[in-house]
Image (tube, rainbow, N blue to C red):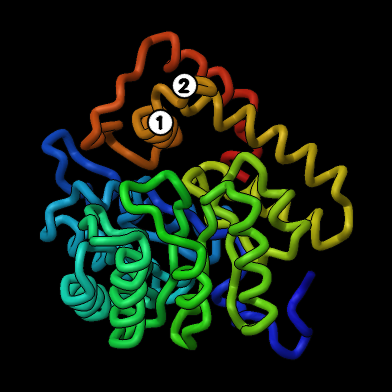
């Protein structure tokens, strides 16, 4: 189901977005030249928005000084070409609002709130739900930036109840939802929220099955692999817009093979290290260093080298 033609989400909140990785030097400091190359590369792939400091961007690990260096460098390199979102997740509305203020000062266009990193246990589930709702509503209501809500479903230390999500999605300052929950009822909830607020933009965050979400009426794709699969993701988006689900499914299958190779197989053994190794081979990053220190075997490197040769036209269109 699509929004009425005269009430579509703003164009800057649609299309393919990338949950961008953060390039580091050997000391795990933001590598400026690599950031500049990464921004230009995203634009080349047709990416319309960059989500900085998400999980794929290692935001929960980044020291504040490095986060601010990253945001300022991206904003400068971007030159207004793409929408810039920054994760501002924290454990209280007060801290989230402080984070939003810094992101705004550094030039971000959008603040993204995921579930808190740590939650308290209250006397009852209803009281816990009430406290979570209050946290979100205060942060959204006091934000000096438009807000995106990141639904991580059960992949989070703090699970946000559906009633809280439904209430938060009604807030006028919530402009986008990134749905990585892989929960059918959350998809239905998001579509119903968009029926009430046709300007609310819905992004699929589960990059292994984009077609299902686009078929349901989602507006775009916000992908952790967008830095390397952005062109293929755009082909999927275009095929679905053209009504050619067969072509979309074929490109999804191709993208899945690429991602599983880069990430070290279906168990995702080499997630950040594999992605960053590919970006080194593409001439974008200088190292594949990452804070969680994912391993990367010689066999996994060889597999990435091989698929790079095979898929070069899609990786560097």
Residue visible at 31% across and 47% down in the picture: 157
Q: Tell me where residue 23 appears, x and y as whole percent.
A: 28, 44
Asked whether residue 78 is in view, the answer is yes
Please count the marks in the image: 2
Drawn side of residue 4 relative to residue 302, left or right: right
Which secondary structure, mark 2?
A: loop
* Image location (x, y in percent) of residue 167: 48, 77
On the image, the x and y values in percent for residue 163 come to 50, 69
The residue carrying pointer 2 sits among few (fewer than 14), some (14 to 19) or many (20 or more) residues within 10 Å by Cα, namely: many
Q: Earlier in the sequence, mark 1 or mark 2?
A: 2
Q: Nearer the viewer, residue 83 or 79?
A: 83
Q: Position of residue 225 (x, y in %)?
A: 50, 43
Q: Residue at x 79, y 37 (%)?
A: 250
The single residue placed furthest to the front in the displayed view is 123
Q: What residue is shown with label 2? A: 264
Q: Residue at x 47, y 84 (%)?
A: 171
Q: Is 31 located above or below residue 173 in the figure? A: above
**Frontmost residue, 9 versus 116:** 116
Q: Which residue is mark 1?
A: 271
**Of residues 133 and 310, which is closer to you in this image?**
133
Q: Is residue 59 above or below residue 250?
A: below
Q: Is 227 situated above or below 313? A: below
**The C terminus sits in image quarter:** top right
Alpha-carbon distance for marks 1 and 2? 7 Å
**Residue count near mark 1 (Cα–Cα under 10 Å), binned few <14, some 14–19, many ≥20:** many
SS under mark 1:
helix
For the N terminus, the quadrant is bottom right
Residue at the (31%, 77%) spot, across then down: 134
Regarding residue 77, the answer to whether it shows in the image is no
Residue ranking furthest to the top: 299
Mark 1–mark 2 CB contact (< 8 Å)? yes
**With 78 as the anchor, is 190 left or right in this view?**
right
């Amino acid at each position: 189901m699509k929004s009425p033609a005269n009430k579509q989400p703003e164009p800057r909140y649609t299309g393919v977005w990338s949950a961008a990785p953060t390039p580091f030097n050997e000391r795990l400091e933001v590598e400026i030249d690599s950031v500049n190359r990464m921004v230009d590369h995203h634009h080349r792939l047709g990416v319309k928005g960059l989500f900085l400091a998400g999980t794929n961007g290692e935001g929960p690990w980044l020291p504040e000084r490095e986060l601010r260096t990253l945001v300022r460098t991206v904003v400068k390199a971007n030159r207004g070409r793409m929408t810039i979102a920054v994760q501002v997740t924290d454990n209280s509305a007060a801290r989230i609002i402080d984070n939003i203020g810094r992101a705004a000062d550094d030039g971000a266009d959008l603040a993204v709130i995921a579930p808190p990193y740590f939650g308290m246990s209250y006397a009852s589930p209803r009281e816990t739900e009430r406290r979570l709702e209050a946290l979100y509503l205060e942060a959204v209501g006091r934000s000096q930036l438009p807000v995106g809500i990141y639904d991580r479903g059960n992949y989070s230390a703090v699970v946000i109840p559906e009633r809280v999500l439904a209430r938060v999605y009604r807030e006028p300052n919530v402009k986008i939802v990134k749905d990585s929950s892989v929960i059918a009822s959350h998809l239905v909830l998001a579509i119903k929220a968009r029926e009430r607020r046709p300007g609310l933009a819905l992004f699929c965050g589960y990059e292994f099955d984009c077609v299902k979400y686009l078929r349901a009426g989602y507006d775009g794709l916000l992908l952790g692999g967008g830095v390397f699969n952005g062109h293929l993701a755009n082909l999927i988006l275009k095929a679905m817009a053209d009504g050619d689900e067969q072509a979309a499914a074929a490109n999804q299958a191709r993208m899945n093979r690429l991602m599983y190779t880069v990430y070290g197989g279906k168990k995702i053994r080499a997630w950040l290290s594999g992605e960053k190794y590919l970006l080194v081979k593409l001439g974008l990053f200088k190292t594949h260093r990452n804070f969680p220190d994912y391993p990367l075997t010689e066999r996994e490197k060889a597999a990435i080298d091989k698929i790079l040769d095979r898929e070069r036209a899609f990786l560097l269109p």
